[in-house]
């Protein structure tokens, strides 16, 4: 596990990241919510002190244990599935920052649950996420998240606890004297590539690997974001394309653990912007139910690329936060089924109305499911001028 010094450094990185993720600056008396699983209690305690020392108000929330979560879905009626605790909306309307410490004690405990029950609960909570998105667009809110090692995660990744912890320490620069400085360097380097991608005025992307042949329309007024503080670690650069221009085949060679379910070798076929066929070696029924969650669940909300020069992650971690930032031999790409990110809009997010989002092809859904491919691949861009240029090959941006 981590030393006290490493936990202190982790807390400093998370506070830096939360600040980077917000367009407005944090100030005295801001409200910061810290959500954590019980194995992350030590880091939550350190964050509590640091937030208090900054003159802000920490609001601490312990997540349900895996047993509590399993019992909830086993027993809850429809009314209980969609119940929102009193005061939750009020908190979201006033919270200025959020840090989530992910340390699950189980990641397969809901595999026996009807996926429709999970979807019903997710849809009911979408209104809270929409409130947070609006506050973020207005510059009043910033969030980040991280992961801590647990025996469950290490087991499913096929690693020892020592090996698993080592991956996290390396990826988050907790073995460095000044991890925040390391992250700032990555942040600055990524900014140069994002500007290069934006200046090209890309119209469409063609992604090819052994099992992928996918065409994506970037859409109007899009920008590439990433390494922005929202996730620690984060090495991906991504955008939310115009979902209407998606066609072809996408395949995820990395397994996915989602809401207590395991999915392996998921293959999605798109036509006219929507998934028309989905198969998986494991978890196929769950996958099909996920894309039926709502109208937007079968559409693409994100396309992402990770440059292997940034990421030291070279093992499967059984957790999307790390797996979507995999470096390895060929980097990775991933798509997200479901909701788009409004901060990929190239204009002022405050002025981005629901009508504008619809017109520009930003997708709306209660789902946002990242599925990852680490195969050797190339990504060719067709520019608005008609010129074609390779922007990513063998795990590297060609910048």
Image (tube, rainbow, N blue to C red):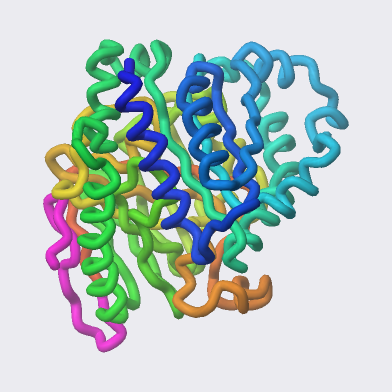
Percent coordinates x, y for residue 226 in the rendering: 36, 57
Residue at image coords 50%, 15%: 105
Percent coordinates x, y for residue 380 in the rendering: 21, 66
Q: Quadrant of the N terminus?
A: top left
Residue 107 in sight: no
Compared across the picture, whether 284 is left or right of 6 comes to right
Percent coordinates x, y for residue 338 in the rendering: 55, 51
- Is 62 a magenta residue? no
Q: Nearer the viewer, residue 252 or 56?
A: 56
Q: Magenta segment range?
A: 382-399
Percent coordinates x, y for residue 143 in the rendering: 52, 49
Above or below 165: residue 237: below
Above or below 216: residue 61: above
Q: Quadrant of residue 254?
A: top left
Residue at image coords 26%, 72%: 197
Compared across the picture, whether 321 is left or right of 92 comes to left
């Amino acid at each position: 596990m981590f030393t006290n010094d490493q936990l202190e450094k982790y807390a400093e990185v998370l506070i830096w990241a939360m600040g980077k993720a917000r367009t407005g600056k944090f100030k005295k008396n801001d409200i910061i919510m810290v959500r954590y699983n019980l194995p992350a209690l030590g880091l939550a305690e350190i964050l509590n002190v640091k937030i208090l020392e900054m003159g802000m108000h920490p609001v601490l929330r312990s997540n349900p244990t895996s047993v509590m979560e399993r019992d909830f879905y086993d027993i809850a009626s429809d009314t209980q599935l969609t119940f929102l605790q009193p005061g939750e909306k009020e908190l979201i309307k006033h919270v200025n920052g959020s840090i989530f410490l992910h340390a699950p004690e189980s990641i397969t405990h809901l595999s026996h649950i009807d996926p429709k029950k999970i979807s019903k609960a997710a849809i009911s909570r979408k209104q809270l996420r929409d409130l947070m998105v609006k506050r973020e667009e207005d510059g009043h809110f910033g969030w980040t998240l991280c992961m801590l090692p647990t025996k469950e995660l290490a087991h499913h990744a096929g690693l020892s606890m020592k090996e698993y912890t080592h991956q996290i320490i390396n990826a988050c620069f907790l073995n460095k004297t000044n991890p925040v400085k390391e992250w700032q360097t990555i942040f600055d380097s990524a900014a140069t590539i994002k500007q290069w991608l934006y200046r090209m005025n890309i119209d469409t992307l063609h992604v090819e690997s052994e099992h992928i042949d996918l065409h994506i329309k970037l859409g109007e007024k899009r920008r590439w974001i990433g390494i922005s503080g929202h996730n620690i670690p984060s090495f991906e650069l991504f955008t939310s394309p115009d979902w209407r221009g998606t066609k072809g085949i996408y395949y995820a060679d990395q397994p996915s653990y989602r809401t207590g379910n395991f999915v392996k070798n998921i293959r999605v076929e798109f036509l006219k912007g929507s998934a028309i066929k989905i198969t998986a070696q494991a978890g196929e029924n769950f996958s099909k139910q996920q894309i039926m969650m709502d109208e937007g669940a079968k559409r693409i909300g994100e396309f992402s690329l990770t440059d292997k020069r940034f990421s030291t992650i070279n093992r499967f971690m059984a957790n999307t936060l790390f797996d979507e930032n995999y470096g390895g031999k060929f980097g990775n790409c991933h798509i997200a089924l479901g909701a788009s990110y409004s901060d990929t809009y190239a204009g002022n997010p405050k002025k981005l109305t629901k009508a504008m989002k619809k017109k520009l092809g930003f997708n709306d859904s209660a789902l946002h499911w990242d599925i990852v491919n680490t195969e050797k691949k190339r990504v060719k861009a067709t520019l608005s001028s008609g010129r074609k240029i390779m922007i990513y090959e063998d795990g590297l941006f060609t910048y």
